[in-house]
Image: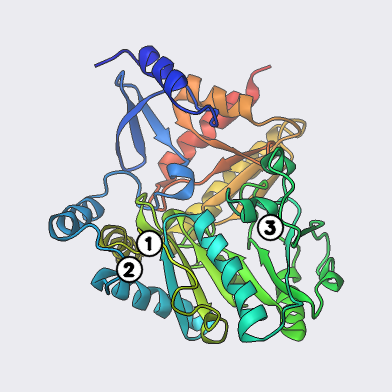
Amino acid sequence: MAHPDELVASARRLLLQNYQQQPIVLERGEGVWLWDVTGRRYLDLTAGIAACPLGHSHPKLVTAIAEQAHRLIHVSNLFFIEPQIRLAERLAALAAPSMGPVRAFFCNSGGEANEAAIKLAKRFQTTTQGRADRIEVLSFEGSFHGRTIATVALTGQEKYRAGFGPLVEWARILPWPLHAEDGLDAITEHTAAVIVEPIQAEGGIRVPPAGFLKALRERCTTTGTVLIFDEVQTGIGRTGGWFGHQLEGIAPDIMSLAKGLAGGVPIGAILANERVATGFVPGSHASTFGGNPLACAAALCVLETIETESLLDHVEKMGAHLRAGLARLVTRFPDRALEVRGRGLLAGLALPGDAAPIVRRCREQSGVLLSVAGGSVVRFAPALLVSPRELDQGLIALEEALSLP
């Protein structure tokens, strides 16, 4: 096997340099642990950026993928696909308590899911509703909705938008709300849709002010605006409920999902209520690989395992444990740790400056893998089955990193 330095050098020579990758080459994983090609073990508290809720090499997921691969991997949506129908049925049942009857569309990523949600909302307004004047789509400062041109235009962070202009003229970004009523006047009878994350993940694990999402729902209902919840990172148990919006007691018109849905296998989805779903008709949108048998079999396994292993309750307990540990760090390092953010197992420690050096120290000195959110927040997004002992190991590593000059 090539030396890791040689592999890194080859990657930098052969790949487009659009990532700032950490200089390790990972080879295998088990549970919340990863090993690189040199044999060094790492505690993974990133879970593929929240995309591996069952951790690595979960035996049930491995079996489900292998069995489906033996039967059928891909046929395209020219035909009905049994695992896709079963997955749509399962997601509809999970969404029903908040959204009522829904219809599903499947694709391959969060960016694609948000793109589909935006297209559906716009087409519903302009075609189904006959309102060609309703073209504007609103989002919020600090948001992250994907890497397509439309979703970049609606991402409220300039670093992701720079160099891609001029961006679409119908996208408008509102200031981050400090109070429940902030920004609502911008939503009018000419607004096609609003897209918002129940918790801003890439924006720094920011939870909206109390009452804001409820007020936003009410305003969108009053004005006839389609409300889209981007649940790419908050969905599938990450915050302690099946979907982040359910913890708020409200419902979107469209919800986007991806990341944790298939345990690391690429998938994206939107769920739309029956009324808004009429915006799509045959030929209006498609995805060649979307909802393929392999990805849907993996997703069905993930959902079943979360339920049978009572992982939602576990997430609530582990989330409380993690936030308590982070709060102790705020008390110990008041000048270096500002506040604890998040819900469930989407949590962050806000720092006064760049979080990247602290994340690097955790990896290099303690073999703990964390990530940065919003530039200044150390993000924890471990597998949903993480144990208190493993979280404590991560907290100790973070404490040691903060202790250094």
Reply above or below: 166 against 131: above
- In percent of the image, x 43 and y 66: which residue is there? 286
| Marks 2, 3: nearer the viewer | 2
Q: Nearer the viewer, residue 368 or 84?
A: 84
Total numbered circles? 3
Q: Amino acid at mark 3?
A: Val
Q: Which residue is mark 1?
A: 290
Q: Which residue is mark 2?
A: 77
- In percent of the image, x 41 and y 34: which residue is there? 43
Q: Which residue is mark 3?
A: 207
Q: What is the CA distance from the residue labelled 2 to the residue labelled 3?
A: 37 Å
* Farthest front residue in view: 283
**Residue 121 image-quadrant placement:** bottom right
**Residue 399 image-quadrant placement:** top right
Q: Do we see residue 246 in this rendering? A: no
Disc on the earlier residue, 2 or 3: 2
Dot 1 falls on a residue whose secondary structure is: loop
